[in-house]
Amino acid sequence: MKIAVVGLGYVGLTTAACLASHGFKVTGIDIDSHKVETINEGKTPFKEPGLDKLLKRSRLRCSIDYAEAGDADFVFISVGTPAGPGGEIDLSYVASAAHSLGEVLANSRKPCTVVVRSTVVPGTTRGLVKNELEKSSGKKVGEDLFLCVNPEFLREGNAVHDTFNPDRIVIGDDWGRGGKNLLRLYRRFYRRRKPATILTSTVNAEMIKYASNAFLAARISLINEIANICNHIPGADITVVSKAVGLDKRIGPYFLNAGLGYGGSCFPKDVKALIKYAENLGERPQV
């Protein structure tokens, strides 16, 4: 089974290295030649615990040429989706990747399954990605080309662990074959482990990703608000309060450390993108 991963950021490279470590023939593709060179030398272009060891023992090979994906059974699109100037999601990298991939798959006789791994707003997979693939390949999704979305829930600094030990696997498919193909791949990858799996529509899968990040960001913001109140109460200790609150099984202990607020490469941009997306639908989020 041949797999290609387009986009070698921390999600794409971790996905590629983990799959390769289990014996799959994996090719990583990225337009950044320096990054490709670094990875082919067995080095990681960023810090991610455990990834360097995984690279050294896997047979991952990387290239800047999309043609390497021409005979793949699966292609994961893991390119970035940064925030635009107004906070809206920038899908230009996703569109470019889907178009370039379609051009390569146009000459392939193998029915490839394309998996959108990038974080994209609801409607992107069945709209922009499908349209770009069909336009540049001349093929029809659901017939001679398969498509699904598989959002990631990796934590930076724990991406390798989270790939091997996911809380759940979410797959969105509107055409019936791509999601089932990916499930078969994951059964081989996880073997005896059986993570919870949700097979649903593409818009549900895309929304699950945003809902998860928005919920965690709101949780961090809420405990910080509670901490601000505690600061005005003589003798109140947010550490004691948050620990006791976290013992409630309905709430749990995670993301209850008061501090500077949420940050990182995902939460801020994803929350802004969700707000902008909602506003474009005529909904003004109040939280």
Image (tube, helix red, strand yellow):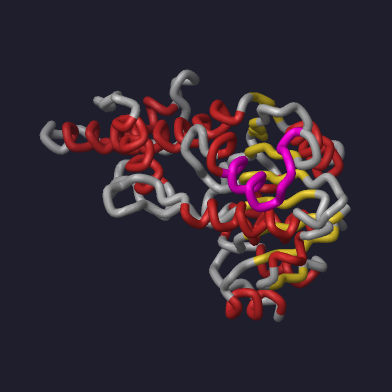
Above or below 234: residue 152: below
Q: Is residue 17 left or right of residue 92?
A: right
Count of numbered circles on the image:
0
Q: Position of residue 267 (x, y in %)?
A: 40, 45
Q: Please report the residue visible at 66 percent of the width from the left and 33 percent of the height from the top.
A: 171
Horizontally, residue 200 falls left or right of residue 155, namely right
Q: Which residues are magenta?
A: 129-142
Q: Is residue 215 left or right of residue 97?
A: left
Q: Residue at x 72, y 71 (%)?
A: 62
Point 66% across, 72% down: residue: 64
Q: Position of residue 208 (x, y in %)?
A: 52, 30
Tell whether position 139 is magenta: yes
- 270 sits left or right of 155 in the view: left
The relative height of residue 146 versus residue 81 in the rendered view (above or below) is: above
Magenta stretch: includes residue 143: no
Taking depth in this image into account, of 273 and 251 the one nearest to the observer is 273
Where does residue 78 sit, x and y in percent of width and height? 60, 53
Could you say which quadrant of the image residue 16 lies in? Answer: bottom right
The percent coordinates of residue 96 (x first, y second) are 55, 57
From the image, which quarter does the C terminus lie in?
Answer: top left
Front-most of residues 228 and 68: 68
Residue 176 visible, this angle: yes
Which residue occupies the foreground of this view, 199 or 125? 125
> Going 67% across and 30% down the picture, which residue do you hit?
173
Q: Is residue 54 visible?
A: no
- Taken as a whole, is the magenta stretch helix, strand or loop? helix
The image quarter in which residue 145 lies: top right
